[in-house]
Amino acid sequence: MLEINNLHVKLEEEDKQILKGVTLTVPAGEVHAIMGPNGSGKSTLSYVLSGRDGYEVTEGSATLEGEDLLDLETEERAAAGLFLAFQYPVEIPGVGNMTFMRTAVNAQRKARGQEELSATDFLKEIRAKAKDLKIDAEMLKRPVNVGFSGGEKKRNEILQMAMLEPKMCILDETDSGLDVDAMKLVSDGVNALRDDNRAFLVITHYQRLLDHIVPDVVHIMANGRIIKSGGPELALEVEKNGYADLKQETA
Ligand code: ADP
Ligand code: MG
Ligand code: MG
């Protein structure tokens, strides 16, 4: 599904190399987790994959189902089936949550050559999915993320993901700032979307999220590279011993 090969990325406005050769393959049907200390480049990787401005790819490649992602505009990446749930979901004052989602869903459908959803069908679907995530109707009417609590923003990201039905879902610290109940809701939302034709890249600081969303593979990122990959037990090892041992081991 997602293939990243020797990806090198620097900041556009200063001479700072952030990703220093990331290589990673996420097959369809699998959930891969990326853990790593603060500042190791995890968010940068997700931003570069989603096409955010400000970064320059100096070497390497990233493809989605064989298609060169780095060549595409952000909206083309979304149309190709890529979805990023942000570490810090943005507030969009003046744009209703429902309107925002309907526009996004219909743009996605159009890109896939499907007909627009009727207003009734859209309402039915979003209400059912919002209910699963315990998002009340009031939140659907408010401007996107404005005045939402941290947990509400994260649940709203998962609702967007559930509505868009992307192929490749990247979640950047979707668990940060969540209490135990909210984390369970978010994890259930993700698990409900697990599918043979879909893949996930779950970026997290904490092992506990991976108790709920059990990954197939865990990668450890440090200083702009993947320094180790393994099964779910690798996350437990990190939780117990921290990153220092691993960094030394691979230095
Ligand atoms: P992580 O998500 O693993 O905590 P980030 O990808 O956010 O790491 O950041 C990696 C490194 O790149 C950090 O040292 C961070 O300060 C730096 N960095 C990322 N984006 C920028 C930016 N726009 N300007 C300056 N430094 C940045
Ligand atoms: Mg960080
Ligand atoms: Mg980050």
Image (cartoon, grey):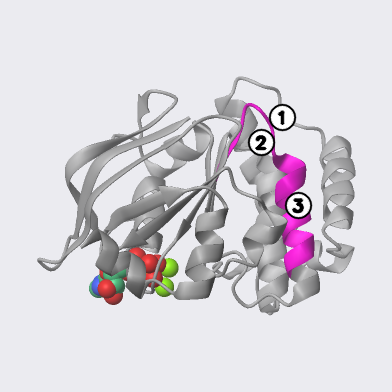
Picture residue at 60% right of the left edge, 27% below the top: 110
Give yes or no for contact between labels 1 and 2 (Cβ–Cβ under 8 Å): yes
What are the residue bounds of the magenta stretch? 183-200
Q: Position of residue 113 (x, y in %)?
A: 61, 19
Q: Is residue 138 visible?
A: yes
Q: Secondary structure at mark 1?
A: loop
Q: CA distance from mark 1 to mark 3?
A: 24 Å
Q: Which residue is mark 2?
A: 106
**Is 204 displayed left or right of 156 in the figure?**
left
Name the residue type under label 1.
Glu
For label 3, being within 8 Å of ligand 3 is answered no
Of residues 15 and 138, the one nearer the viewer is: 15
Picture residue at 38% right of the left edge, 74% below the top: 38
Picture residue at 56% right of the left edge, 55% below the top: 233
Q: Which residue is mark 1?
A: 116
Name the residue type under label 2.
Asn
Picture residue at 72% right of the left edge, 29% below the top: 116
Question: Label 2 neighbourhood size at 10 Å, few (<14), some (14-19), many (20+)?
Answer: some
Q: Which residue is mark 3?
A: 189
- By secondary structure, the bulk of the magenta-drawn segment is best described as helix
